[in-house]
Amino acid sequence: MNEDELVARIRRMAEPGARRRLVLGIGDDCAIYRPRAGEELVFTTDLFIEDVHYRLKNEQAGVLGRRALARSLSDIAAMGATPRFCLVSLALSKRTDHKWAEAFYRGLLALARESGTALAGGDFSHAARVVCDVMVCGSVARGKALRRDGARVGDAIYVSGPLGGWRHRAEIVPRLDIGRRIASKATAAMDISDGLSTDLWRLCIASGVAASLDGPLPVLAGATLDDALNGGEDYELLYTAPQKVRVPGMRIGSIVEGRAGDVFLMGLKVKARGYDHLSSSRR
Ligand SMILES: [Mg+2]
């Protein structure tokens, strides 16, 4: 099978969702998406690389395809946005053939359909290891996107579910529903991709505030407090809202006055020890 045949197959798999959303989908030089009046577009892109994010021999292609899209959809959820379309680029290796690629896309497209995300295009190439990049565009009512920089002293801090990191989580479930429900209520939001200790620090730095966590934190079955703070790849949402505003999720603490970025758990300073790609690549 050559590249054009593979593209034709993927295009047939993608068509039902794409027709609903796009003016023009796969098959031309660019896709066309026409934004509606009053909506603002949000964009995110995530790399998903063999031996960095997963081991090829441990995973099924379809599971990886689904996960590749889920990671980017989590960012869309964190903005309180609704996904509209995605662009997926995939470099295959010697150990992955067109059958593997088709299964990868089948997994990805199942989640695309569930979440209303059209596959608008992408690119194929080859490399020593499998490399995938998923770019997603979402939309949100003008001025309503949830950013990281809006947390204020006195706000309560929430997570959308218990934490524990990738070792204790079978699947990434992008919290699109919660993102939309908190869209007009939360003061700041982000998704937890690198661990609560690092991501809450980031939110606090962006907002110029400090955070105080109450114990005990909601922890997944079998996970430790260290997994919940530093494990990474939870893909739950982390958000803040004024105390009086009712939002879904689990309350874990409060925004407090203090040095920007300081995070305390039951009075003790928490170090940001989540995942850092740059320090990991220097090891
Ligand atoms: Mg994120």
Image (tube, rainbow, N blue to C red):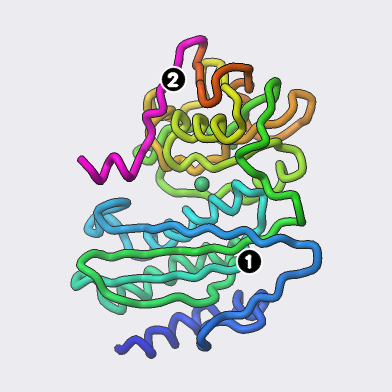
Q: Is residue 18 among what the camera can see?
A: yes
The residue singled out by tag 1 in the image is 84
Magenta residues span 267-283
Q: Is mark 1 within 8 Å of ligand 1?
A: no
In the picture, the quarter occupied by the N terminus is bottom left
Q: For residue 51, what is the image quadrant?
A: bottom left
The answer to whether residue 235 is above or below residue 98 is: above
The answer to whether residue 60 is above or below residue 175 is: below
Outermost residue, top side: 267
Q: Quick one: label 2 or label 1, which is nearer the N terminus? A: 1
In the picture, the quarter occupied by the C terminus is top left
| Lateral position of residue 232 relative to residue 256, left or right | left
Q: CA distance from mark 2 to mark 1?
A: 37 Å
Residue nearer the viewer, 42 or 101: 42
Q: Which mark is residue 270?
A: 2
Residue found 27% across the figure and 41% down from its top: 280
Q: Identify the amino acid type marked 1.
A: Arg
Determine whether the residue tagged by mark 1 lies in a helix, strand or loop. strand
Residue found 53% across the figure and 68% down from its top: 86
Determine whether the residue tagged by mark 2 lies in a helix, strand or loop. loop
Mark 2 neighbour class, 10 Å CA radius: few under 14, some 14 to 19, many 20 or more: some
Residue 163 drawn at (x, y percent): 47, 32
| Lateral position of residue 226 relative to residue 238, left or right | left
